[in-house]
Image (cartoon, rainbow, N blue to C red):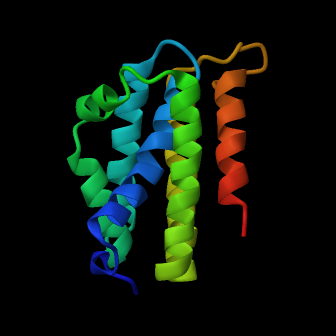
Amino acid sequence: MTTASAFIPEEWEILSAGILQPAMAVSLAERGGTLTEMLALYDTLAGELKAHSSNPLIAALLDHVVSRKAADALKAYDDIAFETLRDMALRTLASAEMLLRKKATPEELAVYREIVRVVCHQVAGAHGEGSGSHGEKVSASERDMLNKIEAILSSS
């Protein structure tokens, strides 16, 4: 198993941002509900931390991400246009994937990917912006962002 010490601080920040930035991009893909979505983000992260506490790398990473306050995460992206955040989130996620492929086990990469999926889907469904005609809770713009994230997570 890999430990946090395998990564330099800059790489650790990329891994952290690879979880937070895509979730923020999903949240900001549709106006409204940001507070509800940020609460869902941190609730989901806390649940994932509990679920993966036996994995040293994943537990340390999630602990690092959860220790940040939601308001601080939001403030960091306040003045960034959605398109810029979207592009930055996708680049960061791809960089995080590359780092994990180089330094972590395949199992840790798979867990990281699943955490990003779960967190992003929880954020997307938290506010229920979808049209509701078919019971959707995810808007078209959030679905588009989720598809872009999934394209990165599904790459080899």
Q: Position of residue 56 (x, y in %)?
A: 31, 77
Query: In the rendered image, which quarter contains the C terminus?
Result: bottom right
Query: Between residues 156 and 46, which one lies in front from this camera angle?
Result: 156
User: Residue at 49% across / 70% down in the picture?
Assistant: 99
User: Residue at 32% across / 62% down in the picture?
Assistant: 10
User: Residue at 23% across / 44% down in the picture?
Assistant: 68
Residue 50 visible in image? no
Q: Position of residue 35 (x, y in %)?
A: 36, 21
Q: Is residue 132 left or right of residue 59?
A: right
**Based on the displayed image, in which of its 4 quarters is residue 5 positioned?**
bottom left
Total count of labels: 0
Q: Position of residue 106 (x, y in %)?
A: 57, 80
Residue 74, placed above or below residue 5? above
Q: Is residue 5 left or right of residue 55?
A: left
Residue 35 visible in image? yes
User: Residue at 40% across / 38% down in the picture?
Assistant: 41
Query: In the rendered image, which quarter contains the N terminus?
Result: bottom left
Q: Position of residue 131 (x, y in %)?
A: 71, 13
Residue 118, placed above or below residue 23? below
Residue 89, placed above or below residue 106? above
Please, which residue is most extreme toward the bottom here? 1
Q: Is residue 44 left or right of residue 126?
A: left
Residue 30, placed above or below residue 94? above
